[in-house]
Amino acid sequence: ALDIYNVTIDATASTADYGAGLNVNSATVNMYAGTIKGGTVTANSGGGSVILQNSAVFNFYNGTITGGRLTNPTSGAGGNVTTWNAACVFNQYGGSIEGGSAGFGGCNVYVRDGAYNLIGGSIGGGNAKHGGSVYVSSKNGGFTMTGGTVTGGTATEGGGAIDVDNGKVSISGGTIKGGTAQYGGAMNIRSNGTVTLSGSGIIDGGSSTGSGGGNVIIQ
């Protein structure tokens, strides 16, 4: 396991096919404080700052993950954090994930497969085609939110904050602050996506520039 305490991993000048800052492959990382500054990912993949592969687990307690960049405009997703395989788990208990960029989807988080659990802390927004903050295509755990905050950005198509494409999302707490999108200013739920809303979660503040769904649209 790797334990991170109050240090900076700076990959700002790095370029990689995936995981420019940290590539976690079938291992466990516990981040208690500090900063991971992402680099540039050029391939059809993700994780400008962090990518989880195979059975990797990342426990994010505090600190900042920021600045990851994906330059592929047609398929690059997950500017900062990507969970790639079904057995991957990212648990966010606190801290901030912010300042990522992705041409296609999920400026800050891409749940391609596996599970992302947001218990506390914050995920910021940016500019993308789908999912100004989070892009979900995983049914193996998907994106579960029991606390924390997701702040939307701008999506030129769907999901100012969250785009659910062939994925599973469960929201029972926390706050989703919508952004701006052509459809679904806060959340875009596609026909093959599944979303469960319960408990005390709040979805608010989104705006649509096109075909409706200021906060949520189901297609």
Image: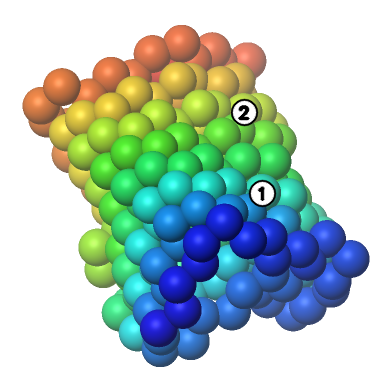
- Residue contact at pointers 1 and 2, CB within 8 angstroms: no
The answer to whether residue 57 is left or right of residue 22 is left
Q: Gap in Å between the C-alphas at discs 1 and 2? A: 15 Å
Residue 35 vs residue 80, the one in the foreground: 35
SS at circle 2: loop
Image point 54% across, 27% down: which residue?
152
Q: Residue at the left extreme?
A: 199
Locate residue 195: give its quadrant: top left
User: Looking at the image, is 174 positioned above or below residue 55?
Assistant: above
Instruction: Let me know if residue 26 appears in the view.
Output: yes
Comparing labels 1 and 2, the label whose residue is closer to the camera: 1
**First-in-chain label (1 vs 2):** 1
Q: Tell me the crowding category of disc 1: few under 14, some 14 to 19, or many 20 or more residues within 10 angstroms, Cα based.
A: many
Amino acid found under the numbered disc labelled 2: Gly
Amino acid found under the numbered disc labelled 1: Thr
Residue holding disc 2: 153
Q: Residue at the front extreme?
A: 6
Q: Residue at the right extreme?
A: 13
Residue holding disc 1: 66
User: Looking at the image, is 23 positioned above or below residue 107?
Assistant: below
Residue 210 vs residue 64, the one in the foreground: 64
